[in-house]
Image (spheres, helix red, strand yellow):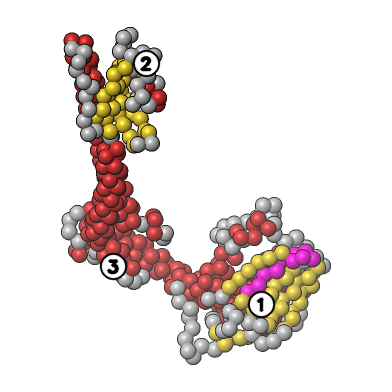
Amino acid sequence: MRYKRRLRSRIIFSFLLFGTLLSGLFATSTLLLRDSLEDELIGSTLKQELDDYLVQLRRDPTVVEPFHTRIQGFVTRPGDPHHNVSAQIRNLEPGVHEVETAEGYFKAAVRKDDDLWAFLIYDITENQRLTRQLVWALVAAVLVFSLLSLALGLWSSSRIMRPVSDLAERLSQLGEETPSPELAKWFPDDEVGQLAAALDAYAQRVHHLIERDREFNADVSHELRTPLAVISGATELLLTQEDLPEKVRTRVLRIARAARQSTDITTALLHLVRAEQGINQDSRAHSVCEIVEKLIHLHEPLLDNKPLELKIVGEDRVSVIAPESVIAVTVGNLISNAIRYTAEGEVVCTIGSGRLLVEDTGPGIPEVELSQVMDRHYRGEGVSGKGSGLGLAIVKRLCELYGWSIHFENRKRGGLRAELKFFQAGN
């Protein structure tokens, strides 16, 4: 699972995002409010001072222009330039303006009557410097609050996720044979406790279903062995008769092959149901070549006069420690599929280098369907004939149980190649 999708990371990110946005909005609103109040206060003050001065000047022409450290006032007449007022300020429209000059930043109040032009200039260079300091201070405050939000998110997520992590850890420690994990007793009666109780109930239902399925499969496998043994014995006795007609012999061989396959499949399915390999340190190794020879011998009379040749190429000996029935089911399905879908030519079984290759001269499989051939109940488009689509699915499960690997690919000269590796490279 990727980190960004973990619930704990979402909680941490939410705290960090909330803290950063909240502190950022607070800093932005502070700057906007300060600028707004400053503009309104300075602008209204300058305008009022200028209006008052002009009123006094008209009453008493001897009133001097206001001059302070940061405030300068100038009065002139239209068309009579005042050398102390720069052209940049003189050309401003009436009102309050913010001007940047070579000397610094200024607020300028301008009033232009028909008889008098008046200018009141306020130096705000220091204000701008303080504003920049305030901006950096607010940025630092945002970073500090973001870090505090991150720390709070880490602490809160750890507290919030601790019961969930504990529940996940207890679930990971459960075995397949556990009928009821009894998780609810370890948690308080909150949301996590309710989830644990629901998992207990679900696990108990699943355990009962699995046990019932295992018992059913074991009973079926056990009950089928006796009639299959009787059928196999009867076919062996019939085949020993020398005067048996050829057609009857072919039919008996079909019965013998079906009985052998049923016995092997029953045993293999029993191993799959129990998830047991059925081997131990004293298990005997079986020759893959000998098993392939038996399977080819059983299939040869069933070719129905198709112009098809079955070949075995033994490069070197390959022995596998596994129940013979499991090897026979796995290999037999590959050979049966090759024979079923090959109308003419040959089916070649090559044994060597810890693997089995089954190659045919059939139509092959479309490339888009190669990855699906081992899916349960999957049958390719345009495939005719009988079949449930379970053979290769069983082969896939057996390979997973015993650690084998299987791979299908189309041959360049036509046909399909199935590669069954019993041993990986280096084993």
Disc 1: CA contacts within 10 A as few (<14), some (14-19) or many (>=20)? many
Q: Residue at x 39, y 59 (%)?
A: 3
Please, what is the three-letter code of the amino acid marked with disc 1?
Leu
Disc 2: CA contacts within 10 A as few (<14), some (14-19) or many (>=20)? few
Percent x, y for residue 244? 74, 77
**Part of the protein shown in magenta:** 411-420
Which residue was labeled with disc 3?
170
Which residue was labeled with disc 1?
356
Q: Nearer the viewer, mark 2 or mark 1?
A: 2
Which residue was labeled with disc 2?
80
**Relative to the observer, which residue lies in front, 3 or 204?**
3
How far apart are labels 1 and 3 at the CA level?
43 Å
96 relative to 313, above or below: above
Quadrant where the C terminus is found in the figure: bottom right
Q: Are marks 2 and 1 in contact (CB under 8 Å)?
A: no
How far apart are labels 2 and 1 at the CA level?
110 Å
Per the image, label 3 sits on a secondary structure element best described as helix
Please, what is the three-letter code of the amino acid marked with disc 2?
Asp
